[in-house]
Image (cartoon, rainbow, N blue to C red):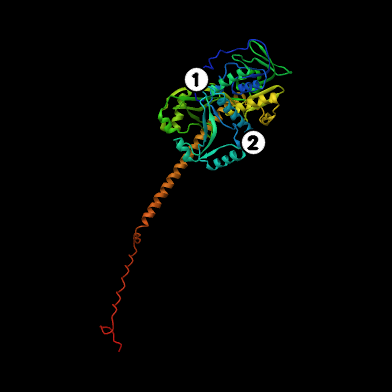
């Protein structure tokens, strides 16, 4: 996300300051959506454009959670690596799922640009960099993405990566030229405005007390009113809580924190030339330049809710570790939001039972995946689109409750630790190879120099006589002619 720290965290933009409407009367609609984040608002906008009557229920306000505190990178793919996706569902279904994710990316691009959302701060390009020297793996992955999944990608060698990012911590990279960034807070409020314009009704400060999905007309109870609908779409992620604990307990809640620096001036461009978003291959760091000379950086995660300000110094140290040439980076603001991670690493999209739909589990999935899920659910309800069944292999799996949180925290620490160790080892090997090449170059130069001079004499070992110097052969007698002192022919 590329707004200033004020617009990101304090909500001083015009959209966030609009009066909130609570549901204070009973209502009957075609589709009721729980959650006014990116997925829920995409369902609302698409379904309203297709002619359905829509009500969106939000317990707080539009974009208050992770949807409004997102780095704003939009690119194809899922949280599950491509190779694992193919192993799980086969190549053909993996291709179809990937095509769906590309549809989500295209939808966000079209919505953000053609609707001319104010302050969207559109920028292009995303770069995934490796913490270790993995050239062969890079080539293999490029071939898969380009040939099997029809995705435009470029392989960057180490020199290219380090010319754009002045650090020795990164090696090879995969560049996605068609990926892009937007200000996610402005985008989510832009979606809400478009949905309202299309006829959807959005009710904020309206938590859901209970849900009864039985019967033809499903029922939702709120503190001050009741709502009936033919279809209910659950887009509340980990915040659904008691109304549908079966769903919320399949998600591991993770709080991701990010910071925005004070303006850094020209020194930022001297160290980070790439203007798209950058993420490392281990999913630990993600950053990009915003507002021309500020650095936005996401790194720490917790499995419990904490005050974002606590992580300012940790993010500051992390930036200095990766980019020591930047010097001290002053932090202007820190923000965070909770996302839901699924056990299988894929989003939860589809129909739980007749008329009860889900679009959740978007932790580490990206903004484009949220949009894809919203489009798919709306079109499934109103058009009978059956492609949501591609997600059937990724069923609801219990995330382990409190024990799962502890395990998730330990796994996260182990992942960061093992990534750091692998990075240290890779950089050590790189320095060792460089020293070896330098030694070989010096040796080759010495041999070249030695080849231009006579080889030095070797002293005999102690106790052995010196070899006698070779005697010069006697000179040949001068040739003479007969009668000049030479032998006579007689």
* Residue located at (40% from left, 52% from top): 444
Residue 90 seen by the camera: no
Residue plotted at (70% across, 25% down)? 383
Q: Secondary structure at mark 2?
A: helix
Query: Residue 273: image x %, image y %?
Result: 45, 33
From this view, report whether residue 122 is shown above or below residue 149: above
Compared across the picture, whether 390 is left or right of 76 comes to: right
Crowding near pointer 2: few (<14 within 10 Å), some, many (20+)? some
| Position of the C terminus by quadrant | bottom left
Checking the image for residue 370, the label placed there is: none
The answer to which quarter of the image holds residue 253 is: top right
- Residue 380 drawn at (x, y percent): 68, 26
Q: Position of residue 332 (x, y in %)?
A: 45, 22
Q: Which residue is mark 2?
A: 95
- Secondary structure at numbered mark 1: helix
Left-right relation of 408 to 217: left
How many neighbours does mark 1 have within 10 angstroms: few (below 14), some (14-19), or many (20 or more)?
some
- The answer to whether residue 236 is above or below residue 452 is above
Marker disc for residue 7: 1
Query: How far is disc 2 from disc 1 in space, using C-alphas?
Result: 38 Å
Name of the residue lying farthest toward the right: 215
């Amino acid at each position: 996300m590329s707004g200033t720290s004020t617009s990101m965290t304090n909500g001083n933009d015009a959209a966030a300051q609009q009066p909130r409407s609570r549901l204070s009367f009973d209502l009957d609609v075609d589709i009721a959506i729980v959650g006014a984040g990116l997925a829920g608002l995409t369902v609302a906008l698409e379904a309203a454009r297709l002619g359905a009557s829509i009500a969106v229920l939000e317990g707080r306000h539009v974009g208050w959670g992770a949807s409004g505190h997102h780095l704003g990178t939009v690119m194809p793919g899922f949280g599950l690596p491509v190779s694992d996706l193919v192993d799980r569902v086969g190549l053909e279904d993996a291709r179809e799922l990937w095509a769906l994710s590309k549809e989500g990316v295209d939808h966000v691009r079209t919505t953000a640009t053609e609707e001319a959302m104010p302050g969207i701060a559109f920028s292009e390009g995303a770069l995934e960099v490796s913490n270790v020297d993995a050239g062969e793996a890079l080539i293999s992955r490029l071939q898969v993405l380009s040939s099997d999944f029809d995705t435009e990608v470029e392989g960057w060698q180490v020199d290219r990566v380090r010319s754009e990012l002045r650090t020795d911590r990164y090696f090879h990279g995969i560049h996605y030229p068609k990926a892009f960034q937007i200000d996610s807070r402005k985008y989510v409020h832009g979606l809400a405005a478009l949905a309202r314009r299309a006829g959807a009704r959005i009710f904020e400060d309206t938590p859901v007390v209970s849900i009864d999905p039985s019967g033809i007309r499903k029922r939702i109870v709120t503190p001050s009113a009741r709502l009936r609908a033919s279809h209910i779409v659950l887009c509340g992620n980990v915040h659904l809580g008691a109304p549908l604990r079966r769903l919320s307990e399949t998600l591991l809640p993770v709080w991701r924190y990010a910071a925005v620096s004070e303006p850094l001036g020209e020194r930022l461009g001297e160290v980070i030339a790439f203007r798209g978003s950058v993420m490392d291959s281990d999913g630990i760091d993600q950053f990009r330049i915003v507002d021309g000379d500020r650095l936005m950086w996401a790194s720490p995660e917790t499995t419990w809710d904490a005050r974002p300000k606590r992580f300012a110094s940790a993010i500051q140290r992390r930036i200095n570790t990766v980019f020591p040439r930047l010097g001290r980076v002053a932090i202007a603001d820190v923000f965070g939001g909770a996302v839901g991670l699924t056990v299988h690493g894929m989003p939860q999209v589809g129909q739980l039972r007749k008329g009860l739909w889900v679009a959740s589990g978007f932790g580490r999935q990206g903004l484009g995946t949220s949009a894809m899920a919203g489009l798919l659910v709306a079109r499934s309800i109103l058009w009978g689109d059956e492609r949501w069944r591609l997600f059937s292999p990724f069923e609801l799996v219990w995330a382990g409750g409190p024990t799962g949180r502890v395990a998730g925290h330990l796994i996260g620490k182990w992942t960061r630790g093992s990534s750091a160790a692998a990075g240290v080892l890779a950089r050590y090997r790189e320095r060792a190879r460089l020293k070896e090449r330098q030694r070989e170059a010096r040796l080759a130069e010495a041999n070249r120099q030695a080849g231009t001079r006579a080889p030095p004499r070797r002293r005999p070992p102690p106790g052995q006589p010196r070899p006698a110097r070779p005697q010069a052969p006697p000179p040949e007698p001068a040739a003479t002619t007969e009668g000049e002192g030479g032998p006579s022919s007689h």
